[in-house]
Amino acid sequence: MIALLQRVAQARVEIAGEVVGQIGAGLLVLLCAEPDDTEVVGEKVLAKILKLRIFGDEAGKMNRSLQDVGGGLLIVSQFTLAADTKSGNRPGFTGAAPPALGEALYDAFVKAARAAHPVVHTGRFGADMQVHLVNDGPVTIPLRITA
């Protein structure tokens, strides 16, 4: 599973002009399931995200986690994180899970996130979304955990 984490001052997802998910300070997580992923892999990714120390402490050092600071979590599906750009100029996406599996794993990830963290919002799987964010830092962390 691939996740791209962006520490944000605020973020929101719109679909056809309607805000469907919005947070203040916290993490925007762009999430891509891969064909061999399982719910267990998703749980490992979530555990890492919640505990990753990428928020500043009193001294400004990145020493606090999302849970420590009580930030929001905005989870957006993004199969393009699995883009293969090795040859040609048109990326291939066979590295992403098929849509049915991707959606099931995304839904399981969101369910687990809501059980583990108090502020969780989402985009909508498969929708044409516009993601607005104010990247804080900027801090952008790629994360990949495999089965």
Image (cartoon, rainbow, N blue to C red):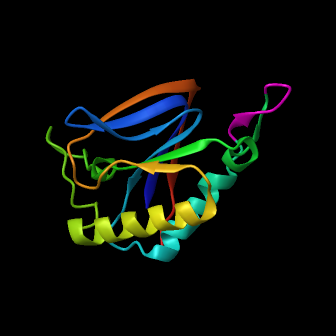
| Quarter occupied by residue 56 | top right
In this rendering, would 57 be left or right of 144? right
Q: Is residue 106 left or right of residue 94?
A: right
Give the position of the N terminus as an image quadrant: bottom left
Q: Could one spot residue 53 in this view of the protein? A: yes
* 10 shown above or below 34: above
Magenta-tinted stretch: 54-60
For residue 48, side relative to residue 88 (left or right)? right
At 31% from the left edge and 53% from the top edge, which residue is drawn?
82
Residue under the image location 34 percent in, 65 percent down: 34
In front of the other: 125 or 7: 125
Q: x, y percentage for residue 41?
A: 50, 70
Residue drawn 75% across the image and 46% down it: 68
- Place of residue 106 in the rendered image (x, y in percent of width and height, measured from the top left): 38, 63
In this picture, is 74 found above or below 47? above
| Towards the viewer: 104 or 3 | 104
Is residue 146 found inside the magenta-colored segment of the image?
no
Tell me where residue 62 appears, x and y as whole percent: 74, 34
From the image, give the main secondary structure of the stretch colored magenta: loop
